[in-house]
Image (cartoon, rainbow, N blue to C red):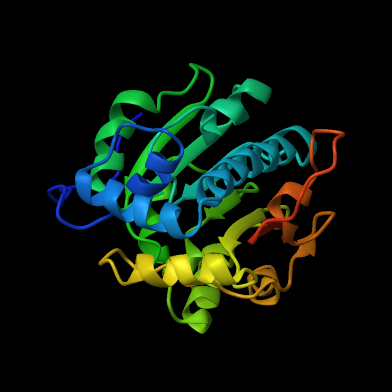
Amino acid sequence: MSDERSPVPEIDTTVPHSARIFGYWLGGKDNYPVDREAGDRVRELFPQIVDLARVSRRFLGRVVRHLVAEAGVRQILDIGSGLPTVDNTHEVAQRVAPETRVVYVDNDPLVFAHARALLTGVPEGTTQFVHADVHEPEEILRAAARTLDFDRPVAVILMGVLAHVADYDEARSIVRRLLDPLPPGSHLAVRDGTDTDEAYVEATRQYNAGGAVPYNLRSPERIAGFLDGLELVEPGVVSCPLWRPEATAPVEEVPVYGGVGRKP
């Protein structure tokens, strides 16, 4: 593991950060009082947020296993990766195919610090970290090209990230700019919260008022719009628990939707 951009700014412990809050909901310890306060406010209004965080994490694992085991992808660009936890993208991917190359991207200095220490790949594969922002797709691709071969398919993962781009057209532009240089057979995986649950909408409104980078809930149709022009992988863009569930027991829908598309 190495980083591909410097210098990294100081960690600001006065402003809540989505990666640290998400990690807090998952039971992680790498956060600050301001993150816990923001996370607790949301949980008080919408107790299911912890379940949503876990559902989202399990969705990531199923997506990565599909990309590597079924689609044959051996290169992954995980943007907005968040803090290391169990079953990180490279761990899931390299468990299936040890030669898989994974590049993580995040803009939180704390993620950067922990990534250097914890996100180490197997000897056959490569795991790198890029400190950059989703609003800088060209910078992300430039840095990722040091590790990934853009003449071969790449899977771009954007989990809970595009909702931090307030303007929908700008978010779609970012997706296009990330995918345009990639060859056919590349994939895009997205997941974001939706505006389909009133309690979740209100909790998110109060979260946004607390000083963190706003998280913009969108309709399932708008989330599906990020995959326009791609070949949707079955079952399409759905509530995350319904995307290729591994359990045989019935699963319930949640206001978090995701899907995977393949570049033709």
- Which residue is painted at 36% across and 50% down in the image? 40
Residue 175 in sight: no
Q: Is residue 6 left or right of residue 66?
A: left
Q: In the image, residue 223 lies at what x, y percent?
A: 64, 70
Relative horizontal placement of residue 140, taking residue 65 as reference (left or right): left
Name the spot of residue 24 as percent of width and height, x first. 38, 40
Depicted 262 relative to depicted 90: above or below: below
Residue at horizontal 61 percent and vertical 30 percent from the top: 93
Number of numbered discs on residues = 0
Q: Is residue 261 left or right of residue 44?
A: right
* Residue nearest the observer in this picture, 249 or 60: 249
Please provide percent x and percent y for residue 74: 63, 36
Is 194 in front, or is 59? 194
Q: Nearer the viewer, residue 77 or 50?
A: 50
Outermost residue, top side: 123
> Where does the N terminus fall, quadrant-wise?
top left
Residue in the image at 52% along x and 71% along y: 201
Quadrant occupied by the C terminus: bottom right
Q: Is residue 102 above or below residue 200?
A: above
Residue 132 in view, yes or no: yes
Residue 43 location (% of width, % of height):
44, 52
Residue shown at 43% from the left, 77% from the top: 166
